[in-house]
Amino acid sequence: MRSDESNHRSPFEAIRQTDDHGNEYWRARDLANILQYDDYRNFQRVIEKAKVACEQSSQAVSDHFVDVTDMIVVGKGARRRRPDVHLSRYACYLIIQNADPEKPLVSLGQTYFAVQTRRQELADEEALAQLSEEQRRLLLRGQISLNNVQLAEAASQAGVITSTDFAIFQDHGYAGLYNGLRAKDIHARKGLKRGQKILDYMNSSELAANMFRITQTEDKIRREGITDKEQAHEAHRRMGLRVRQFIAEEGGIMPEDQPTPTRSIQQIQREMVQREAQKRLEQRKGNQQPSLFETPEEDA
């Protein structure tokens, strides 16, 4: 039985490595061999193309491509240094997409890494589903903060430079998603006080809709090379509208009709910190050992 499993094991799975922390990776030279690149220098050009694709998708190259140096044994026991690259699953996927399509195993690799990447996404979705509403809000709010930074970077190429520029740009996205409502209108509809941010008073469903609006707008601006401010505004508005249309088609609750949480993200964070501190205090008390030199109680 084990032999049969080995015979049907993907060659890409066979070269998968795991580091001391349980993180998976692939060696570039192993991948080059599987894809039948006889000259590693040719494969290095594919790696460089994949790095460019990684940057264009707003991913940190250093998170997915790690340069290493191995010591290998050559003639008569001599050792020499040989450069290699440790690749994440995503890096392998990008490499496969940029590899020579004439290579026999490239199509197999595209299928393998596409399927495995989707499996990981499903696992992440399952993990997200097991979180409480408050935990989902914290996770999504933090992710949106990062996404907005990336969106601002993309929009800057279209002349969205100042904070006022970005606020106007954001309003176009909100208008598309919220049926014409802009940030100040959403703020008023939620009954928030001055200084309270609308993103801090959204439930997880509303946050998820906004995150999709943000990420897809960034991708559109970069993909289409938008360099005009008005075109960027329209792209953001249309993407917000597309997300709204999808919610309507699925029979979902419109963002402006989502209930407003009574507690802000900051309140939840403070309470979680306090609970964690209390938990650690109780653990320390539970781990305390009785003194060996306690004075026994006197007999009555």
Image (tube, rainbow, N blue to C red):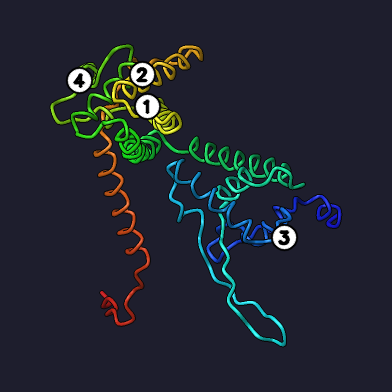
Task: Give the labeled residue for mark 4.
Answer: 184
Tag 2: residue type? Pro
Q: Is residue 5 left or right of residue 95?
A: right
Residue 9 lies, with reference to residue 67, above or below; the image says above
Observer-nearest of 15 and 140: 15
Please report contact status of discs 2 and 1: CB closer than 8 Å, yes or no: yes
Tag 4: residue type? Lys
Identified at 53% across, 63% down, the residue is 21
Task: Give the labeled residue for mark 1.
Answer: 210
Task: Give the labeled residue for mark 2.
Answer: 255
Observer-nearest of 153 and 228: 228
Observer-nearest of 146 and 142: 146
Between the C-alphas of marks 1 and 3, the distance is 47 Å
The label shown at residue 38 is 3
Tag 3: residue type? Asp
Between the C-alphas of marks 2 and 4, the distance is 15 Å
Q: Going from the N terminus, do you reach mark 2 or mark 1 first?
A: 1
Q: Going from the N terminus, do you reach mark 4 or mark 3 first?
A: 3
Please report contact status of discs 4 and 1: CB closer than 8 Å, yes or no: no
Tag 1: residue type? Asn
Is disc 2 placed on a helix, strand or loop?
helix
Q: Position of residue 289 (x, y in %)?
A: 36, 72
The label shown at residue 74 is none
Q: Position of residue 1 (x, y in %)?
A: 86, 54
